[in-house]
Image (cartoon, rainbow, N blue to C red):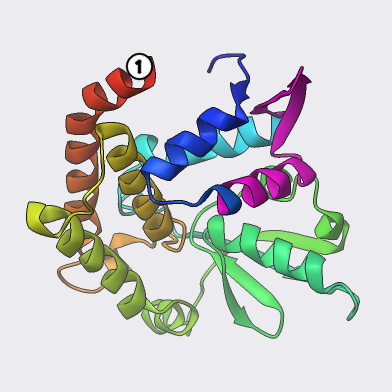
Amino acid sequence: GRKVHIATSSVIEVMDRAGISEHATRSTLSRMARRDLLCRVRRGRQVYVGLTRRSREVLHDGRVRMWGTSAVNDRWDGSWTLLSFSLPDSWQRQRHELRSRLLWAGFAPLQGGLWIAPTRVDFAMVGHGLEAAAHVKVFEARALPPTDVDALVRDAWDLDAVAARYRDFLDRWSDPGRRPQLPDGLAAQLVLQAHWLQVIRRDPRLPVQHLLADWPAEKAHRLFRTLYDELDPQAHAAVAR
């Protein structure tokens, strides 16, 4: 939310506190710049990085996912988004990038090149800047008899794997003795948030009526928010220093 650029050396220092090597940080920053997720500015010998329009959209979407929505879809109106695409065989990179965006948006492959998501998805935002976007067709639909929606959900998504990621998060962060030993609140908050993002990016937020019993997402979400808030004053103090 601030129009600032941050010194690359500062990013390297913070990532080092979180256990990320300088080489890994530099290579990641370079890839992000090539993919229009960071802009770079040089002042003398120092290089600074700032956000682009694309990365601001990504961060806004992530903020909504983390803070603006519940852990489960308890207001589902029965609508599905259907999407199909057909790309040239040589478009391996474009296919991978499209599939990555679809997974983040909650889609799963249903059958024969048809993908499905349990909510209305604005593909204009999902497909922004994608070379493959012109090869995509999107529809809004509702399931009709004799479709077994429970079976459809089980076939399209690995519910056991999604639940296991939430339980792993709970196991790792609910016990102070099992949490990563990090030097300060900023590093701890970054690692906590990164782990949470890895969990929710593969959760399509399926309708609660089609989930397994004792679904762990809400409990994990409450834990994430509680720990994030507890670490926030320490993180801000570390940034100020």
Q: Which residues are magenta?
A: 24-52
Image quarter of the C terminus? top left
Q: Is residue 192 above or below residue 136?
A: above
Q: Is residue 158 magenta?
A: no
Residue 213 horizontal/vertical position (percent): 17, 72
Q: Is residue 38 magenta?
A: yes
112 horizontally vs 79: left or right: right
Residue indicated by mark 1: 241
Residue 156 horizontal/vertical position (percent): 49, 79
90 horizontally vs 22: left or right: right
The answer to whether any part of residue 175 appears in the image is no
Q: Residue at x 80, y 65 (%)?
A: 94
Residue 70 horizontal/vertical position (percent): 31, 45
Could you say whether the residue bearing mark 1 is in a helix, strand or loop? loop
The answer to whether any part of residue 128 appears in the image is yes
Q: Is residue 239 above or below residue 93?
A: above
Q: Amino acid at mark 1?
A: Arg
Residue 73 horizontal/vertical position (percent): 35, 53
Q: Residue at x 71, y 29 (%)?
A: 53
